[in-house]
Amino acid sequence: MLHTIIKKNSYQDSVNLMLLTNYISALEGVVQASIMMGTPANKDIMRNSGLYTDELEMAGANDMCIVIDTEAHTGLDDILVAVDSFLSDQSVSSSQSSTESVRSWERALKENPNANLAIISVPGQYAAAEADKALDYGLHAFIFSDNVPVAEELSLKQKAHDKGLLVMGPDCGTGIISGVPLAFANRVKAGNIGIVGASGTGIQEVTTLIDRMGGGISHAIGTGGRDLSETVGAITMLDGIRGLAHNDQTEVIVVVSKPPAKAVREKVVSQLQGLPKPVVTLFLGEKPSIHEGNVYEAYTLEEAAMIAIDLAKGAAVQPLYSLPIDVPKTALNPGQISIQGLYAGGTLAAEAAMLIADALQLKDGLIHEAGYVLRSNGHAIVDLGDDMYTQGKPHPMIDPATRIQHIEKAAQDPATAVILFDVVLGYGGHDDVAGVLAPAIEKAAAKAKTEGRNLYFVAALCGTHQDPQSYAEQMRKLEQAGVLVKESNNQAVRTVLAMMQLVLEDVPKAHRPATTFAPQAFSTSAAIEALLAGKPSVINVGLRKFTESITASGASAIQYDWRPVAGGSMKMQQILDQLKDYQFTS
Amino acid sequence: MKYQTIDEANRVVIDKIVGGAPFLVDVVPAHTVIPELEGKTLLHAGPPIAYKDMTGPMQGSCVGAALFEGWAKDEMEARSMLERGDIHFIPCHHVKAVGPMGGITSGNMPVFVVNNRSEGNEAYCIMNEGIGKVLRFGAYSEEVITRLTWMKDVLGPTLSRALKATKEGLNLNVMIAKAITMGDEFHQRNIAASLVFLKEISPYIVNLDMDKQEMQSVIKFLADTDQFFLNIMMAASKAVMDGARTVKAGTVVTAMCRNGQDFGIRISGMGDEWFTAPVNTPQGLFFTGFSQADANPDIGDSAITETFGVGGMAMIAAPGVTRFVGAGGFQDALATSNEMVEISIDQNPNFTVPTWNFRGICLGIDARKVVETGITPVINTGIAHKEPGVGQIGAGTVRPPVECFEKALEAYASKLGLL
């Protein structure tokens, strides 16, 4: 059924009207629509498309002609409201993105001449070359990319060290410079605690715990997981420690790492003992029994945060930091014997494995194969961020799908008593992990119930109240789904252990003066000092969302939409190189 | 030699673009300036193509031209002449000309004559017929032929006499500079430039000794035809780019055009040689009743405007048409022009864009930068129906295939003895 509406003296640009026509044509009940100004040429077009009506005869060039062919029972009113609202609200349909992007280093540097940091998240095979260019341009590099050969990492870090620059990464997930989150990181309050860490979620856990316990962070420098290997020799960690030692905002330094090679550990610790600032170390997997000199050794990420807070306040460090555990009443069947840990954060998984192995007094339960970090006595801790789960798929911190599959599988196993997992908030992560996991958890628990089992879920919620995802809201959603939510990974694991009637012994630590104390001369470069003196100015080479979180924090960033030169064609790259160098002879 | 490296050679080419001084000096029957149009000969858009390989709208234009020239009495006769090969074809670009869409130009069609005073060369382009059912989009009804005949008999001679009454023709640089500040990008939007043209030419027209009704019809046509300046801009771009490509060195793109089958480019270092690859189909917005499925593949010589640095390259200049970039708005137009800077050697100080903080339009597309970044120029274009006779069905944007630029660089490297 054809309807004609003429809006007298209502001029609209033809583009707007084409957009409006597309929009109206898609409405329910509309067979076809044409909205044009009533010029003779347009009337011809209406005629050609079978939408000419006699009413159009009277319309002039300044009249808007709306001809709508509707299904018989469809009324016109809603459609006319839609037309009016479209026309009055056209600016909103325009893209709001204001992120400036460039496609070359040349333009990136021209647009942001003050840049001092490059974030590189290009495919691994190209990452080292781009980081090398960044160093040549005098920029510090934060390399998010993984799969960079260790030899290239070493050569980049040596070059950076010689030039007084920092290379964070490769495979560096997290960093915070003067409150500006780099890659996967949380919004934390400013404060006097600086962190250098060879672990992404380890840094996230410590920084967010400090934030929620009332402390604040000056900087968090990620080094990449291999920095403390024998090959690399902690080049970035040592430069980072020296940088923080010189940084006025930093009064306490926290070092987080998995246990390093012995010689490297000694090199790092002897550097720490020479510093004029107190240091907290967490070498994950070591169970320290002593604090020495100005170096305080923590057992868990939570303890590291608590010691740092006391030091930051100028309070005395206590021999033991143990928070009371609220043990829920559990009713398990005799066959329900196992803890299943399904982690998104690698360091959090490793910490859970360490604590469980300690409670079980395992000698050899800790493994590193097929994504498992612990597999013993029926208990398992899986790092779902391991390469074997993420190939061709997004990381579980971005996409919870893999974790949901594992939850379903673990819930079906009659031996499972508790499913333990982490929820990591912050920039770079999923917008609403709790909202996606909750229905799967409720379903799994209900199914177990019908099979005569109580299935328990315990979560460690890592994040801050300033994070883009609301901490309180995420907690509420999890709790509503029946999950016991704990504010640290340590608390979550200890709760699970208590539920399983497993005991974890804590060792009070004595403090003794440093035996090897020898104040050392140390210095930092002007470039590192400048990086830590204020908000970084960033060239983000790769993933666009990293730029968004930086600009959201008030720092300047240029988005470099990186592509391989000549689409990766070796032949064209060679031709380009030759043409670049060509000299006309005559 | 004035240059040692390719960068320096390119600089000489772009200096000639900046220094170009196009003047609109006359409107004449095409055969009087293009001697190649003798006998049954037609010019077509794009790199060389045979009649049988032309897409619908270009074939439709050929039929229309045969009717207009009186070679055939009806469509059937025209088609059989064309199919028999009675009519000879030459690309517009081979005879100093450019043609919009189908590009079909016949000897008796009036063409603009643009003289590039800096190099002393000329370029030609037929006049814009308006919108809807028009020859360039493949329509050839009686109405179309009648209009073409009127343009030949009335419009062309009137403009010719008016232009001759000016001292030195019309300085197109001045008109372009004015219109770009008024929101034209000279490919999809020419309304400001068309008005500036009308403002410049009408005092001369109204002073001519001619039939009052014919005079009125000329003024009315110029006033109604929003895109009238597009064809002048095409001839101006062609004149300037032909002047610049006399350098015969470097990697500056000196022409881009399409015949519905292939996209073709020329670069300064390879002179007259075309580098072609299969053409893409424009994406855009459609008149009611038509959709992407009806769209003819990209066609026409009008991409000479992008080669010069306007059209899609200057998207940000024309907020009025920015939404053709898809559903986006001003920010997308800004992003488009900013992206085009990545493949341009410099920016032309003669034509500054207010909405771009008075940055100059893109100057000198470097084929090396296109290949290096994978960014291809954005072309603003009309969309023809793929069937002959239907005409324009929408407008949108299209990009050339990157292979054209790769082939050009490879050939140039080979010419320089590098391969």
Image: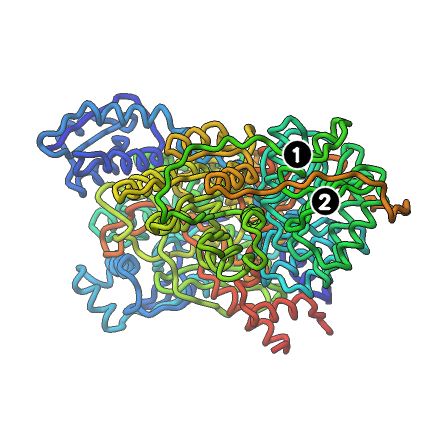
Q: Which mark is residue A289?
A: 2
**Residue at figure coordinates x 47%, y 45% from the top left:** A398
- Between discs 2 and 1, the one toward the N terminus: 2
Graded by Cα atoms within 10 Å as few (under 14), some (14 to 19) or many (20 or more), the crowding at tag 2 reads some
In the picture, measured across the screen, residue A83 lies left or right of residue A532, that is left
Please check whether the numbered discs 2 and 1 fall on a single chain: yes
Q: As rendered, which of A360 and A48 lies closer to the eye?
A: A360
Per the image, the residue denoted by label 1 is A321
Q: Callout 1 environment at 10 Å: few (<14), some (14 to 19), or many (20+)?
A: some
- Seen from the viewer's position, the closer of residues A328 and B3 is A328
| Secondary structure beneath label 2 | loop
Left or right, A318 with respect to B168, comes to right
Q: Residue at x 31, y 41 (%)?
A: A443
Vertical order, A54 against A448 (above or below):
above
Viewer-side residue, A228 vs A91: A228
Left or right relative to A311: residue B292: left
What is the x, y in percent for residue B13? 63, 58
Image-based side of A399 in relation to A104, left or right: left
* Rendered position, A342 above or below B265: above
Q: Is residue A518 visible?
A: yes
SS assignment at label 1: loop
Q: Amino acid at mark 1?
A: Tyr
